[in-house]
Image (tube, helix red, strand yellow):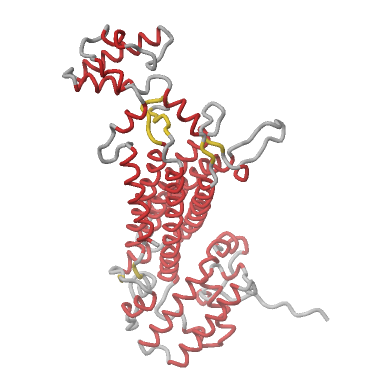
Amino acid sequence: MSPRKKPAPKKLWAGRFRGKTDPQVETFMSSLAIDRRLYRQDVAGSIAHCRTLERAGVLTRREADKLVAGLKQVEKEIADGLFRFMPAHEDIHMAIEARLTELVGEVGGKLHTGRSRNDQVALDLRLYLRDVVKDLLAGLRRLQESLVALARRELSVVMPGYTHLQRAQPVLFAHHLLAYVEMAERDKGRLRDALRRIDVLPLGSGALAGTNYPLDREYAARLLGFPVVSQNSLDAVSDRDFVVETLAALALVMAHASRFAEELVLWSSQEFGFVELPDAFCTGSSMMPQKKNPDVPELIRGRTGRVYGHLMSLLTVLKGLPLSYNRDLQEDKGPLFDAVETVQDSLGMLASLVGSLTVRGEAMARAAASGFLLATELADYLVLKGVPFRAAHAIVGRIVRDRLDREKGLADITLDELRSFSPAFEKDALDVLSVEGALERKVQIGGTARKRVEGRLKVWQREFRAEA
């Protein structure tokens, strides 16, 4: 005799309906494949809700204890891979409640008292993001630490600084790396700022209007570690600003990661030859044996578009929604989860890659010494001799044009040649035409002089120790 097939679970909201949900609709509406990862947050929120119901006298202590024990068992089943998810459950909230009721019996039907999936999912998202932001902050700090370590290791390396991807002025390679450390610090600041608005309890808002039960929302907030309770139930269940804000911060993280990835691609090319990427982060060509392709930086650069797209996707979902909750909001989690994972993976890849990067200091130094990177030094020299800057700029421009016509650079220019363009050039004029001097004259705050860069490295090391 074949075993009897277990009947499909009845919808927890089915009382008002005579007909069954079309199976295609059931599949179309199910979010289980995406939101099942919120199971820990859903269980934590449900446990806090149980205790709040107990405090309000809606549940007895025995009932609350039974529900909490059941919820913990459901959480363990999911964590151990023993939980059976079914499309009829629709989402993680219904799946957990259905299984809980199987385990604890009729009292399971009391769990949802004074609660809606609307405030429940808002809570789960906030709990999820609260943890994720802390992880992202740690990932950004690891990237900063790897950049600072490389900058300290290569402190003496000089490279061309660029504008318009044209060689402009010499800078310390360490100074260039620290620019990305500054960007990451701003990224951390944006995420910390977003965390203030994430860290608000929506539970107790019900479907949209609040609840009819004397729920102590501040007590629930304390149980879950929220410093603030939402003040408008309509807003609480429909607000996804905190998700958009997080996505916007992540988009900027990826913008910075992509800029650095692009430079790694350029620097590792034969045309630049400034760095060599570790073999472990590259692949070869299926046709050309000599190739070493910078796949990891390229993928980081490419995946930046995904994160940008997720931000625009959610903004578009929200742009025309009337208050309060609408099913459209189910579309918030897919973009958010993918963006978070993309950024986490990208930060981890970059931090590891930077730690294994080979720097070709000689190639950078040759590039910094060639061409006309010291032209600005000559113009500034004239200014210090009393020539107006615009006049000095024009004089040095003519010098550069003349040297180009002669197919020469500035390295072998003579004092007489300089004086043929302006009598303001004196015997010390040639002294400014050194890369080392050009660097060391940039001593103002934020400049590329070695002592400034060393000082900033020390500041970052103190910052990292304070954050640890």
Q: Position of residue 263 (x, y in %)?
A: 48, 36
Residue drawn at the location 50% of the way across and 50% of the way down: 351
Q: Is residue 445 left or right of residue 63?
A: left
Q: Is residue 390 above or below residue 81?
A: above
Horizontal side, residue 123 vs residue 25: left or right: left
Q: Is residue 448 above or below residue 341?
A: above
Looking at this rendering, what residue extends furthest in the front direction?
427
Q: Residue at x 36, y 30 (%)?
A: 436
Q: Residue at x 57, y 43 (%)?
A: 296
**Where is residue 218, by image quadrant?**
bottom left
Q: Position of residue 171 (x, y in %)?
A: 37, 33
Q: Which quadrant of the figure contains the C terminus?
A: bottom left
- In the orientation shown, which residue stands out farthest toward the left? 386
Whole-percent x and y of residue 142? 46, 54
Observer-nearest residue: 4 or 61? 61
> Looking at the image, which is closer to me, 224 or 429?
429
Q: Position of residue 451 (x, y in %)?
A: 31, 41
Name the residue: 49% across, 43% down: 305
Q: Work out whether residue 264 or residue 97 is closer to the camera in this orientation and state it.
A: 264
Count all numbered tags in the image, as a single digit. 0
Vertical order, 429 against 323 (above or below):
above
Up-down relation of residue 442 to residue 134 (above or below): above
- Would you identify the image quadrant in which residue 441 lies? top left
Q: Quadrant of the N terminus?
A: bottom right
Nearest to the observer: residue 194 or residue 312 = 194
